[in-house]
Image (spheres, rainbow, N blue to C red):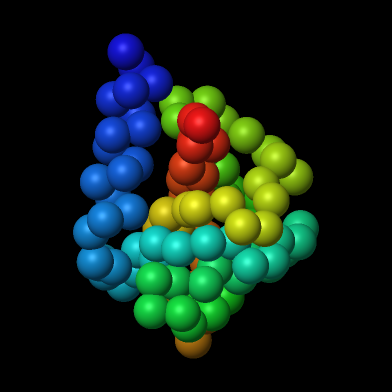
Amino acid sequence: MRRFIAAATLAVALAQPALGHEGGRHVKGVVKALEAQRLVVTDLTGQDVPFTVTPSTKFVRGEKGISWREVRPGERVVVHGELEGASLSAAVVMVAAPRRE
């Protein structure tokens, strides 16, 4: 049941338009590239949005915390970024659960 609720919550979040608040920005899309200190997400409009990945960036899949190394290009994500100067720093990266066939 928890997995269903987490999946439903993420599905609703992915369906919502990008929101920004308190100097931050939510980006929904697909991982284009991920390295130790850089994440690039192609958003729903097709634009690439770069984020800085810091030691405090949290990666989650469902209710479980994961390592950035577990995230693969092509996976659907919602990223909450915090504006730091002219760039975005990834605070939380929520990775969609794999689709069941």
Task: Tell me if residue 30 can be seen.
Answer: yes
Number of marks in the rendered image: 0
Locate residue 28 relative to residue 40 in the image: left or right: left
Location of residue 38 in the rendering, given as x and y in whole percent from the top left corner? 68, 67
Residue at the limit of the structure toward the top, as seen here:
1
Can you say whether 70 is above or below 23 in the image? above
Query: Relative to the observer, which residue lies in front, 37 or 72?
Result: 72
Which residue: 40% across, 62% down? 28
Which residue: 32% across, 13% down? 1
Which residue: 56% across, 31% down? 65
Residue at the limit of the structure toward the front, as seen here:
101
Query: Relative to the observer, which residue lies in front, 13 or 67?
Result: 13
Can you say whether 65 is above or below 13 in the image? above
Locate residue 4 relative to residue 60 in the image: left or right: left
Query: Relative to the observer, which residue lies in front, 91 or 28?
Result: 28
Task: Tell me if residue 91 can be seen.
Answer: no
Which residue: 31% across, 44% down? 11
Locate residue 28 relative to residue 76 in the image: left or right: left
Location of residue 33 in the rendering, given as x and y in whole percent from the top left corner? 69, 66
Can you say whether 97 is above or below 37 in the image? above
Locate residue 39 relative to residue 35 in the image: left or right: left
Location of residue 82 in the rendering, given as x and y in whole percent from the top left corner? 42, 66
